[in-house]
Image (tube, rainbow, N blue to C red):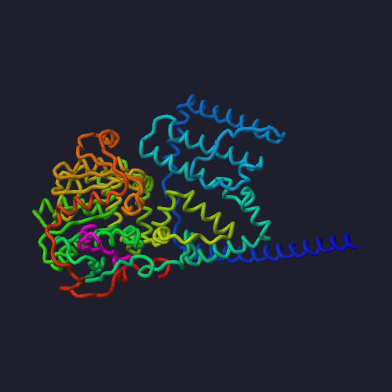
């Protein structure tokens, strides 16, 4: 009786689990149908818009690359033979493991590769074989793209980028049936992980208005002005493109000369004010500086007429307001990324016009020489600029287009990793303030964006001395005055060698060049209290390359902020009584203001 009862209980448990799995699969089917309806509805809404074949203009480049491969058969044959030999070695290794014999892996994931961390990728012979075969093949394809034959450097970079994007998309970890972690979760949760995941996908489609807007963090965990951008201050002035924030002092005395930040308008300024521990704004105020911040508008049709010159004029107007507010005749400027590119052109024009308002300028990861301008350069040529023009018919580039471009630069982490975590494993992404900021994308005014792409990325006209701004022809040699220039060693947006070349070309300025550890964000947002990374200093910029400059550079542990503070004090004048925000202009609203709170996915 007990045996029969035990069998009956087991059968009933199996039937309950089967019923639960069947119900979940029915829910998966229903949600999948809703997802397809959303996709088809979005396609129908854009049916009148002609499709652009090959919008990224990859076909001409890969056609030329195919010819390069055909012209170098021996190199290709050698690489292919090495791949086949490695695959044969892998097959022998896998067969040995099938037979119960120990075997060392032929290839292993690089340190930091999160795709194959689950135990079954190594312990299960089949999944281990899939993993290693993929790694060998991806290495072969990327090596071929990188080294075979002679190819124009820009086209080589394009081939490498899209080859990497392809192999990252084809990772076995991205496929339900080939990912042991997903299969294990589906079995143990009776498919409930897929139900949760597809509901998240549906919500992301709705948030993206028919485009899949992959969430990278808990979008409800943070709020601008509540959890981030919380350094006290006030909006004291605004116009059509910016709000000007003045931060409240925390010291009884401050340096007389104010500091105005020009952040990039390609994303939100509050990466410099994420939280109290990371905030550069809070730290600067605590060091006794009177700090102003530009908060750019998140543009729409109302900014369709804005130009590079009108944005520069807005910076100039903000400078005047900050100087009048503080009673000073000169001001220090600080800038980040594309904001630094604009400051560079502003300084060159100011020198030509005998404008002496700028006491000093600081550039964070700002490119001025675009000869080798990082991975974003793969998106820029005449055809892709024309495609961008089509996207900007309303006078601005939609924010989701910028978000997609930046995510493509790190697709393994920022696209495919979240597809697996969110939609297959059904896990909510971890709350992370930096990723919330990363998802808080901005639109771009059409004329400003086109000028930037053509004049800098495509033509590199600032270096050529042919940059036309507001009736002036500008070059890097026109820049005068003290400049503090920061590059970050692992930057893929503004590569350090490129930033260094631009710093050297400011031959008539007094340039202090600093190389910081880490990348485009972490290398800049590195408070001294964190005691992370390092920076290198070398006052001699005669070395033609960054590598040669590094040979004589002195390494310092920790944050470069302390070095910048010492430099900035020398350009900030005597100490005066601290100033309250808006004492002369009045207060429009508390910081961070309304401009920075406008999100494209909530319009």
Quick one: 602 or 306, which is closer to the camera? 602
Relative height, residue 571 to residue 489 (above, below):
below
Residue at image position (22%, 46%) is 462
Q: Is residue 573 left or right of residue 12?
A: left
Residue at image position (46%, 27%) is 72
Which quadrant of the figure contains the C terminus? bottom left
Residue 155's spot in the image, x, y percent? 38, 39
Relative height, residue 408 to residue 395 (above, below):
above
Quick one: 101 or 151, which is closer to the camera? 101
- In the figure, residue 198 lies in which quadrant? bottom right
Q: Is residue 559 magenta?
A: no
Residue 517's spot in the image, x, y percent? 34, 45
Instruction: Please indicate, yes or no, whether residue 267 appears anywhere in the rendered image.
Output: no
Residue 424's spot in the image, x, y percent? 59, 57
- In the figure, residue 317 lies in which quadrant? bottom left
Q: Is residue 306 magenta?
A: yes
Relative height, residue 81 to residue 603 (above, below):
above
Point out the stretch of residues depicted in magenta. Answer: 286-312
Residue 196's spot in the image, x, y percent? 59, 64
């Amino acid at each position: 009786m007990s045996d029969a009862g035990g069998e009956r209980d087991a059968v009933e448990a199996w039937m309950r689990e089967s019923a639960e799995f069947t119900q979940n699969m029915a829910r998966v089917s229903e949600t999948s149908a809703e997802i397809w309806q959303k996709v088809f509805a979005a396609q129908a809404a854009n049916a009148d818009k002609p499709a652009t074949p090959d919008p990224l203009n990859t076909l001409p480049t890969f056609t030329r690359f195919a010819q390069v491969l055909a012209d170098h058969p021996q190199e290709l044959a050698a690489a292919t033979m090495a791949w086949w030999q490695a695959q044969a070695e892998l097959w022998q290794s896998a067969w040995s493991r099938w037979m119960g014999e120990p075997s060392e892996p032929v290839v292993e994931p690089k340190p930091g590769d999160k795709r194959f961390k689950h135990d079954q990728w190594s312990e299960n012979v089949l999944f281990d074989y899939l993993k290693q075969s993929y790694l060998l093949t991806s290495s072969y394809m990327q090596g071929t793209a990188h080294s075979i034959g002679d190819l124009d450097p820009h086209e080589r970079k394009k081939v490498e980028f899209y080859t990497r994007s392809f192999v990252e998309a084809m990772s076995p970890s991205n496929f339900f049936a080939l990912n042991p972690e997903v299969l294990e979760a589906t079995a143990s949760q009776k498919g409930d992980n897929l139900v949760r995941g597809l509901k998240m996908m549906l919500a992301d489609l709705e948030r993206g208005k028919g485009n899949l807007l992959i969430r990278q963090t808990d979008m409800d965990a943070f709020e601008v002005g509540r959890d981030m951008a919380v350094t006290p201050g006030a909006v004291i002035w605004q116009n059509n493109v910016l709000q000007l924030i003045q931060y409240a002092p925390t010291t009884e005395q401050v340096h007389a000369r104010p500091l105005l930040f020009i952040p990039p308008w390609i994303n939100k300024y509050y990466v410099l004010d994420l939280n109290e521990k990371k905030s550069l704004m809070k730290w600067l105020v605590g060091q006794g500086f009177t700090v102003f911040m530009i908060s750019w508008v998140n543009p729409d049709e109302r900014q369709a007429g804005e130009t590079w010159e009108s944005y520069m004029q807005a910076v100039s107007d903000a400078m005047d307001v900050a100087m009048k507010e503080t009673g000073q005749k000169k001001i220090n400027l600080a800038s980040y990324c594309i904001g630094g590119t604009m400051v560079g052109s502003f300084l060159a024009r100011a020198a030509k016009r005998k404008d002496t308002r700028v006491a000093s300028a600081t550039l964070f990861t700002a490119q001025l020489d675009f000869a080798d301008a990082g991975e974003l350069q793969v998106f820029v040529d005449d055809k892709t600029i024309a495609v961008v023009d089509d996207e900007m018919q309303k006078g601005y580039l939609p924010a989701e287009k910028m978000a997609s471009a930046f995510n493509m630069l790190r697709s393994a982490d920022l696209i495919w990793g979240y597809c697996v975590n969110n939609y297959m494993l059904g896990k909510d992404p971890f709350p992370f303030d930096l990723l919330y900021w990363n998802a808080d994308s901005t639109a771009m005014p059409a004329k400003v964006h086109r000028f930037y792409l053509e004049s800098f990325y495509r033509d590199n006209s600032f270096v050529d001395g042919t940059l036309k701004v507001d009736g002036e022809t500008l070059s890097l040699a026109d820049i005068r005055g003290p400049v503090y220039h920061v590059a970050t060693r692992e930057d893929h947006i503004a590569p350090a060698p490129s930033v260094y070349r631009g710093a050297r070309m400011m031959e008539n300025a007094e340039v202090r060049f600093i190389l910081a550890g880490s990348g485009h964000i972490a290398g800049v947002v590195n408070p001294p209290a964190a005691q992370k990374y390092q920076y290198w200093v070398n006052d001699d910029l005669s070395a033609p390359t960054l590598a040669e400059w590094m040979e004589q550079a002195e390494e310092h542990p920790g944050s470069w902020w302390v070095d910048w503070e010492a430099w900035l004090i020398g350009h900030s004048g005597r100490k005066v009584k601290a100033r309250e925000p808006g004492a002369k202009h009045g207060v429009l609203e508390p910081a961070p203001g309304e401009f920075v709170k406008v999100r494209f996915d909530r319009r």
